[in-house]
Amino acid sequence: MSKENPKIRFMQGNIACAEGALAAGCNFFAGYPITPSSEIAELMSQKLPRAGGVFIQMEDEIAAMACVIGAALSGAKALTATSGPGFSLKQENLGYACMTEIPCVVVNVMRGGPSTGLPTMVSQADVMQARWGTHGDHPTIALVPSTIPEIFWQTIEAFNFSEKYRTPVLILLDEIIGHMREKITMPGPGEVKLIERKRPTVPPDKYNPFEYTDDLIPPLARYGQGYRFHVTGLNHDRTGFPTNDCREIGKMNNRKLLKLDHYRDEIVNYETHMVDDCKTLIVAYGSTARSASRAMHLLRDEGQKVGFFRPITLWPFPDKELEEIASQVEVILVPELNLGQMVLEVERAVHGKARVVPLNKVDGEPLAPHHIVQKIKEL
């Protein structure tokens, strides 16, 4: 903390995530310690009880996700944080949260895998799991910050999205971003905009927890305040009770997907650098985006027309925005710390308008700027 300006901190990424959750009004955390996300749980265990919230360490990741769902149904802004194997264990209950439209936030600080993999080393191999990890068709919001200040603000955004759209929201950090430290200026009173979930305006006997509304987002009552309603992982109708009516099942499943499609432009976030005249475009996210940005500047200094596109929301993917840029470029390089996951999404988005080339690394070490520079020079 700066003596001259107490708002300025030198903060670790995982701590910025926890601080962002607290600033967003998070008042419940359930989790299980796992490297490299444990600092999030550690800080929440210290600060939540002091602020009147609840911290609970569960016996495993499955139970932690179940606790988050229960707390959210009781009106809490609920958070859990995990990594690798823990994210895999959460998938069944994460699917339950998708089916029942539970607002909650799940942080995954990515490490190498599969299985126990590389507990203390970096990876970006969970980005497709974030979209398709739980079974069935379901909408997904996944945010991928690249700086410490962005972690703080994107965590707040995650809570706002979950509350506004009544859906689980994922935050994908990686080991480097989670453990690195940077300067951050903390907001003052009144500088954080918070969104609260929509509450029912009808009496309890008229309330349907999955009502079809014009905005596609059903109001969510709070258990313990007079509203008694059914919640099940089975396909259900507007009352929340299971149904085998095919028309009702199709209508309900489509509404959940249409809900995020309808608000897609409010959710999708990205940034671009030097794309107006670029012939080679680098698409990167998370910690790799930092190396990509540096590589772009090094190549620009040599006279090469290189631009940079960084998705901040991986899901929904900014496909329309990327396709527009792809119309003018010749080659798109996708560096990532996996064996080629988002490169497939980039290929889908650009519809053959540019050649898409992967650059992959899965040995636990980061992709450095010179790796990206070398690859572009080869191209």
Image (tube, rainbow, N blue to C red):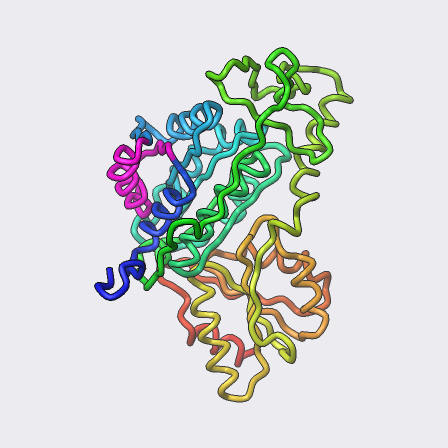
Tell me how many marks there are: 0
Residue 245: image quadrant is: top right
Among all residues in the image, which is located at the extreme top? 205
Whether 299 is drawn above or below 325: the answer is below
Percent of width and height locating residue 112: 38, 50
> What residue sits 21% from the left and 63% below the top?
3
- Nearest to the observer: residue 213 or residue 168: 213
- Nearest to the observer: residue 313 or residue 218: 218
Whether 288 is drawn above or below 210: the answer is below
Question: Does residue 110 appear left or right of residue 167 in this picture?
Answer: left
Residue 32 sits inside the magenta stretch: yes
> What residue sits 72% from the left and 67% below the top?
353
Q: Quadrant of the C terminus?
A: bottom right
> What residue sits 63% from the left and 56% below the top?
318
Q: Which residues are magenta?
A: 27-52
Residue 287 sits inside the magenta stretch: no
Percent of width and height locating residue 289: 47, 65
Percent of width and height locating residue 116: 34, 42
Whether 134 is drawn above or below 13: the answer is above
Question: Does residue 368 appear left or right of residue 99 in this picture?
Answer: left
Among all residues in the image, which is located at the extreme front? 190
Q: Quadrant of the N terminus?
A: bottom left
Question: Does residue 43 appear left or right of residue 67 in this picture?
Answer: left
